[in-house]
Image: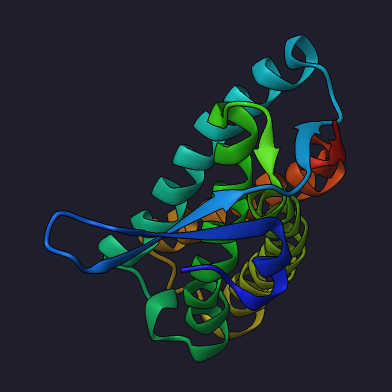
Amino acid sequence: MIRKKYSSDYKVHQTLNKDGRLKKEAEYVGSKYVFALSGETRLPLARKFFFAGILGWAAYLLPLATRNHLSNVVFCILPHVCTAIPLWFLFHGIFQAAFSPEPLIREKADKAFSHLRYGTAAALVFSALAALGALVWAIFLSQGNLAGGDYLFFLCDCYLLFFSILAFRHQDLCRTEPV
């Protein structure tokens, strides 16, 4: 399905199939895009970020799968859970930079750059809030009742924060330019 924003990039052809039904086919006639960074610069860095993103997903899921006290603290678990959607956008942008064949169509180029840009900003905020909440709870509210899972929860949120900061600094991985 063609989005309205990108409809001018397509030309629709109508043909009859064997059954006599009208068949519509869209042909892309819009601009082609390539990544602004050269392949030898972008690909190794994007693939490293891709594997760091896989570790990011592990760091997201691990605190949810272990026993800890922070899962019961609303101001810790809520930002951690809300990190999932920005982390998905961040991961999608990095995946596009690492594995998309060039040239790209305008829709794919726009999605890759905007997913990385907005995903990193939101993941940065949510993971910082989760790490800060875990730190505040551990220092002021835990009353010495810390478990190993609490340390793991905090370390995983710190990894997500670090990963988001690095991705934020390397947003140019998905910057595109017309051919």
- Specify the farthest residue to the left: 19
> Which part of the image, by quadrant, shows the C terminus?
top right
Observer able to see residue 159: no
Observer able to see residue 2: yes
Image coordinates of residue 8 in percent, x first then y, are: 72, 65
Please report the residue visible at 54 percent of the width from the left and 79 percent of the height from the top. Answer: 76
Please report the residue visible at 66 percent of the width from the left and 68 percent of the height from the top. Answer: 7
- Specify the farthest residue to the bottom: 74
Please report the residue visible at 68 percent of the width from the left and 47 percent of the height from the top. Answer: 29
Say left or right for 58 vs 176.
Answer: left
The quadrant holding residue 100 is top right
Image coordinates of residue 115 in percent, x first then y, are: 67, 58
Q: Nearer the viewer, residue 100 or 103?
A: 103
The quadrant holding residue 40 is top right
The quadrant holding residue 11 is bottom right
Q: Nearer the viewer, residue 73 or 120?
A: 120
Image coordinates of residue 70 in percent, x first then y, are: 44, 76
Say left or right for 52 vs 124.
Answer: left
Q: Nearer the viewer, residue 60 or 38?
A: 38
Say left or right for 179 vs 125.
Answer: right
Q: Nearer the viewer, residue 4 or 76?
A: 4
Please report the residue visible at 79 percent of the width from the left and 15 percent of the height from the top. Answer: 41
